[in-house]
Image (cartoon, grey):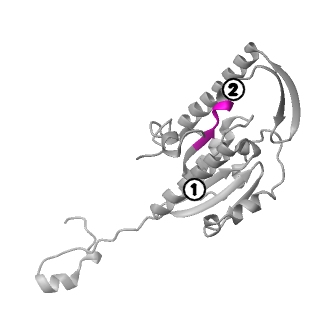
Amino acid sequence: MPGDDPRHINWQAYARTGNYSMKLYREEVRPSVDVILDISESMKLSEKKWQRSLELFYFAIHAALKASASLSVSVIKGSEHLHFQNDMIHGSSWIDKIDDLPSTPAAASPDLSQVPLRAQSMRIFVSDLLFLDSPESTLIALSRGRGRAILMVPFLSDEEKPQWDGNYDFVEVEAGSHHSHRIEAHLLKRYRSAYQRHFDLWKTLAQKHGLLMARIPSEPDFQTALQYEALSAKVVEF
């Protein structure tokens, strides 16, 4: 056809058939997927939440491997992170290593600028997003290098809609400090409103940055939990 590069004419085929044909070249593109697991103490608030977090972590890994993607796996806790070889994550030895990471300040945001995210990769971040800092720094870090990102957010119903009433001794899970409070109806209402505003802000800013986000409950079975928000948010497809 006019405009074709004559250097790519298949002369051997022309010699056999007398018809011109072109050699076509297609670059094989292998997707890159970076999976990051937040291992701050709030992720281990209960066995159910930690179990759901690990399920999401391995679900992302399995999906990447099934797509024949180039996989990179990291865990992060505040300013500290560990990067694992793919063969290590198929066992449990990596879990022993994360216990050696130092404690972080209460509600400290993970410093994703330290994680080796690859240019134009798909980033899957598993975190409860319970940070005091603005979501902007986390979302900008996930978007750097023209990357795309998915946020999978495990949560407990006791976090979202606690039924507190009376005197409680609260434990700050990151620092281990204790705080005694009397919870009455007006204070409980303020907590629930603040919790709702927190995640509304995350969703609004994630959309602004073109990132997908879904909150995933820890109590139901895994498939049911994905139908809570992940399907409608197009984080997963069945």
In depth, the one of 37 and 28 nearer the eye is 37
Looking at the image, which residue is at 52% across and 40% down?
Answer: 225
Figure check: 202 above or below 186 = below
Q: Which image quarter holds the N terminus?
A: bottom left
Which residue corresponds to mark 2?
Answer: 162
Looking at the image, which residue is at 65% across and 52% down?
Answer: 37
Name the outermost residue toward the top.
186
Q: Position of residue 237 (x, y in %)?
A: 42, 46
In depth, the one of 144 and 2 nearer the eye is 144
Dot 1: what SS? helix
Is residue 224 something one can see in this rendering? Answer: yes
Q: How many marks?
A: 2
Is residue 209 something one can see in this rendering? Answer: no
Looking at the image, which residue is at 60% across and 28% down?
Answer: 200
Q: Which residues are magenta?
A: 152-159
Q: Amino acid at mark 1?
A: Tyr
Q: Is residue 139 left or right of residue 168?
A: left
Q: Amino acid at mark 2?
A: Pro
Q: Is residue 189 magenta?
A: no
